[in-house]
């Protein structure tokens, strides 16, 4: 057990709202910012750090090494699970943000 990779980063500071901004203008600005964030490529999103970690560790270890990534609920995203499914010697444990039903998912032997 051990730490195989880490990345230090911090969020960019958000610009301050104008002092004369009305609540309606603020809601409109926030809605526009959410729309723009949803339309960014995944690789440019903050949540890409989870896939970056999986990919980097996979390239550092032997194919004979079994790696289990442990993520908090922030790692509960589709792209993470898609990446894990592509790898043979890598697993994941996520403290999920939502209950997941696995009844209809085919689990490989």
Image (cartoon, helix red, strand yellow):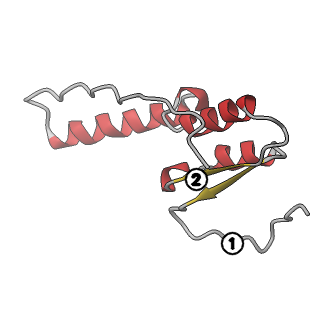
Q: Earlier in the sequence, mark 1 or mark 2?
A: 2
For residue 70, the mark is 2
Specify the farthest residue to the front: 1
- Who's the residue at 73% across and 42% down the image? 83
In the foreground, 93 or 4 = 4
- Who's the residue at 38% across and 33% down the image? 33
For residue 53, the mark is none
In the foreground, 31 or 47 = 47
Q: Is residue 3 above or below residue 68?
A: above
Specify the farthest residue to the bottom: 103
Q: Position of residue 34 (x, y in %)?
A: 42, 38
- Who's the residue at 74% across and 29% down the image? 59
Query: Which numbered disc, 1 or 2, marks the residue closer to the eye?
Result: 2
- Who's the residue at 80% across and 35% down the image? 62
At mark 1, the secondary structure is: loop
Residue at which label 1 appears = 101
At mark 2, the secondary structure is: strand
Q: Position of residue 66 (x, y in %)?
A: 77, 48
The crowding category of the residue bearing disc 2, from other C-alpha atoms within 10 Å (few below 14, some 14 to 19, many at least 20), is few
Q: How many marks?
A: 2
Relative side of 71 to 64, left or right: left
Relative side of 10 to 39, left or right: left
In space, the residues marked 1 and 2 are separated at their CA atoms by 20 Å
In the foreground, 102 or 22 = 102
């Amino acid at each position: 057990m051990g730490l195989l990779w880490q990345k230090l980063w911090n969020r960019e500071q958000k610009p301050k709202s104008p002092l004369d901004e009305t609540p309606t203008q603020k809601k409109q600005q926030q809605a526009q910012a959410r729309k723009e964030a949803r339309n960014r490529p995944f690789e440019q999103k903050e949540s890409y750090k989870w896939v970056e970690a999986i990919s980097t560790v996979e390239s550092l270890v032997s194919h004979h090494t079994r790696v289990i990534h442990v993520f908090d609920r922030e790692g509960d995203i589709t792209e993470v699970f898609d990446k894990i499914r592509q790898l043979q010697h890598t697993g994941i444990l996520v403290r999920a943000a939502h209950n997941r039903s696995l009844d209809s998912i085919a689990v490989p032997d």
